[in-house]
Image (cartoon, rainbow, N blue to C red):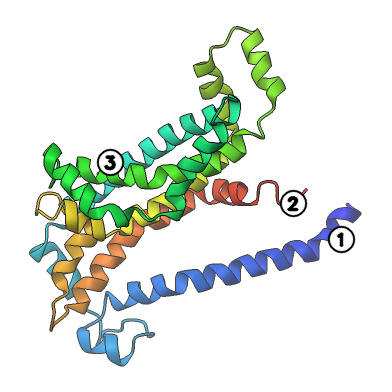
C-alpha cells in the first residue's frame, strides 16, 4: 500500500505527459475534421473555430461521393494494406525465426542483407520495378502494389522480430521438441504468441506508409479501377484550383482506419516499443 502511494505521483505525471502528447498528436486531425464541415471561406478565415450555423457545410462530402468512387478507392486501399501486412508479418516472422533459431554459415551476412532494405529506399528501384511489372502483366493491378509493399516492409519486420525471437527461452522451445512438437508447431504455438507485441509494432509501422503512399499507386496502378484512397483524393487537387472542402472531407474519412488501428493495437504497440527498456 505504501509503495503504491509513493508511486502515485509518478503515475499521475506519466498519465499527464501521455495526455499532453496525445492532444498534440491529435490536434492536426481535429483541425482537418472540423474544417471538413465548413464552407470554403470559413476554412481560411477561421480555421481553428468550430462550425456554426453560418459556416456549416457538407459540400465537401457531397463532392467526394459525386465526383469520385470513394468506396472503391477505400476498398482498394483496405485490400492492399491488409494483404501487405499479412504477408509482411507471415514471411517476416518466418525469416526472423530462422535467423534467430538456427545458426549456420552466413547467418550474420544473411541478416545484414535483409536489413539493407531499411537503409536503401525501395523507390530507388522504381524504374526496374515498373519494368518487371510490365513484363509480368501486373500493371494496373492490386497484386503489383501488394508485392511492392511486402518487399518494402520485410526488412524492418525481420530486423525487429529477430531481436524479439532471440529473447524467447530456449528451454521452452526444447521442451516443445521433447513433447514431440514440430518446428512449425513451435513457431506457431510457442514463439508467435510471445512476440505478439513486436508484431503489432511492425504492423503499425508498416501500415501508415502503405495506407498514405502516393508514389507506387501513381506509377503501378493509376487506372480508375485500382486507385487507392490517397491517389483518388488527388482528383480534387488541381494545378491552379484546389477543392479544399473535398480534400479535407476525403482526408477525414481516410483517417478513420488509421485511428482504429491505433486504438486496437495501442497497448501491444507500447509493450513492443518499451520491451526491455525498463527492468
The furthest residue to the bottom: 45
Q: Which residue is mark 1?
A: 6
Gap between marks 1 and 2 measured at Cα: 18 Å
Label 1 vs 2, first from the N-terminus: 1
272 left or right of 116? right
Relative image position of residue 262 (x, y in whole percent) = 47, 54
Q: Which residue is mark 2?
A: 278
Tags 3 and 2 touching, CB below 8 Å: no
Can you tell which of label 1 and label 2 is closer to the viewer?
2
Q: Of circles 3 and 1, which is in front?
A: 3
Q: Earlier in the sequence, mark 3 or mark 1?
A: 1
Callout 2 secondary element: loop
Tell whether 46 sits left or right of 55.
right
**Circle 3 residue:** 147
In-image side of 176 versus 1 (left or right): left
Do tag 3 and tag 1 residues touch (Cβ < 8 Å)?
no
Q: Secondary structure at mark 3?
A: helix
In the rendered image, is residue 58 in sight? no
Amino acid at each position: 500500500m505504501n509503495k503504491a502511494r509513493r508511486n502515485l505521483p509518478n503515475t499521475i505525471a506519466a498519465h499527464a505527459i501521455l495526455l499532453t502528447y496525445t492532444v498534440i498528436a491529435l490536434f492536426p486531425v481535429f483541425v482537418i475534421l472540423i474544417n471538413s464541415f465548413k464552407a470554403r471561406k470559413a476554412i481560411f478565415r477561421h480555421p481553428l473555430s468550430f462550425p456554426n450555423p453560418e459556416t456549416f457545410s457538407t459540400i465537401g462530402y457531397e463532392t467526394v461521393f459525386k465526383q469520385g468512387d470513394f468506396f472503391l478507392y477505400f476498398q482498394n486501399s483496405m485490400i492492399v494494406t491488409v494483404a501487405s501486412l499479412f504477408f509482411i508479418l507471415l514471411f517476416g516472422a518466418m525469416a526472423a525465426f530462422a535467423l534467430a533459431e538456427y545458426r549456420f554459415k552466413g547467418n550474420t551476412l544473411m541478416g545484414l542483407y535483409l536489413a539493407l532494405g531499411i537503409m536503401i529506399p525501395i523507390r530507388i528501384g522504381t524504374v526496374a520495378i515498373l519494368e518487371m511489372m510490365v513484363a509480368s502483366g501486373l500493371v494496373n493491378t492490386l497484386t503489383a502494389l501488394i508485392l511492392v509493399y511486402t518487399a518494402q516492409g520485410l526488412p524492418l519486420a525481420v530486423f525487429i522480430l529477430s531481436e524479439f525471437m532471440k529473447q524467447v527461452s530456449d528451454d521452452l522451445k526444447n521442451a516443445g521438441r521433447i513433447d514431440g512438437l514440430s518446428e512449425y508447431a513451435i513457431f506457431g504455438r510457442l514463439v508467435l504468441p510471445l512476440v505478439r507485441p513486436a508484431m503489432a509494432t511492425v504492423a503499425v509501422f508498416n501500415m501508415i506508409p502503405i495506407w498514405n503512399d502516393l508514389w507506387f499507386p501513381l506509377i503501378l496502378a493509376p487506372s480508375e479501377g485500382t486507385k487507392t484512397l490517397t491517389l483518388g483524393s488527388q482528383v480534387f487537387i488541381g494545378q491552379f484550383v484546389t477543392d479544399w472542402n473535398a480534400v479535407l472531407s476525403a482526408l477525414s474519412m481516410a483517417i478513420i482506419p488509421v485511428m482504429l488501428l491505433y486504438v486496437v493495437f495501442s497497448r501491444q504497440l507500447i509493450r513492443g516499443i518499451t520491451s526491455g527498456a525498463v527492468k
